[in-house]
Image: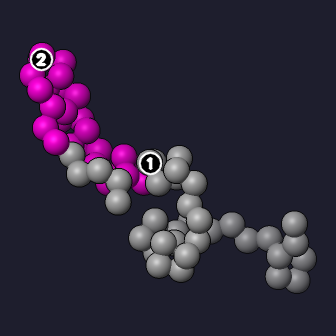
């Protein structure tokens, strides 16, 4: 695989920006980004479940 002038660049784009440019983003990357964005909500739900309460709803991946 060759890049510009024989160099290969690797960059991280937020999913929304990658989507805007039509870049295919693997599901794993999208899921990791979603989990980072919803980390507080996920922790709150984990704590609720630990106490045998129902978790709150978290918005899904777009």
Q: Residue at x 18, y 18 (%)?
A: 50
The answer to whether residue 27 shows anywhere in this view is yes
* Quadrant in the rendering for residue 10: bottom right
Locate residue 20 relative to residue 26 in the image: left or right: left
Q: Is residue 36 magenta?
A: yes
The answer to whether residue 7 shows anywhere in this view is no
Locate residue 32 relative to residue 42 in the image: left or right: right
Asked if the residues shown at circle 2 and circle 1 are in contact, with their CB atoms under 8 angstroms apart, the answer is no
Q: Main secondary structure of the magenta part?
A: helix
SS state under label 1: helix
| Viewer-side residue, 21 vs 35 | 21
Return the disc, 2 or 1, that comes first in the chain's sequence: 1
Residue 25: where, in percent of width, then height?
56, 61
SS state under label 2: loop
Residue 5: where, in percent of width, then height?
88, 83
Distance CA(mark 2)–CA(mark 1):
26 Å
Indicate which disc residue 31 carries. Answer: 1
Residue 29: where, in percent of width, then height?
52, 52
The boundaries of the magenta stretch are 33-57
Indicate which disc residue 51 carries. Answer: 2
Q: Residue at x 48, y 72 (%)?
A: 19
Eyeballing the image, is 16 above or below 33? below
Q: Quadrant of the N terminus?
A: bottom right
Locate residue 46 relative to residue 52 in the image: left or right: right
Indicate which disc residue 8 carries. Answer: none
């Amino acid at each position: 695989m060759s890049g510009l002038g024989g160099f290969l660049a690797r960059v991280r784009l937020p999913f929304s920006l990658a989507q805007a440019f039509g870049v295919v983003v693997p599901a794993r990357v999208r899921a990791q980004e979603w989990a980072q964005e919803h980390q507080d909500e996920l922790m709150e739900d984990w704590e609720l479940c630990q106490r045998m309460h129902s978790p709150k709803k978290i918005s899904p991946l777009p």
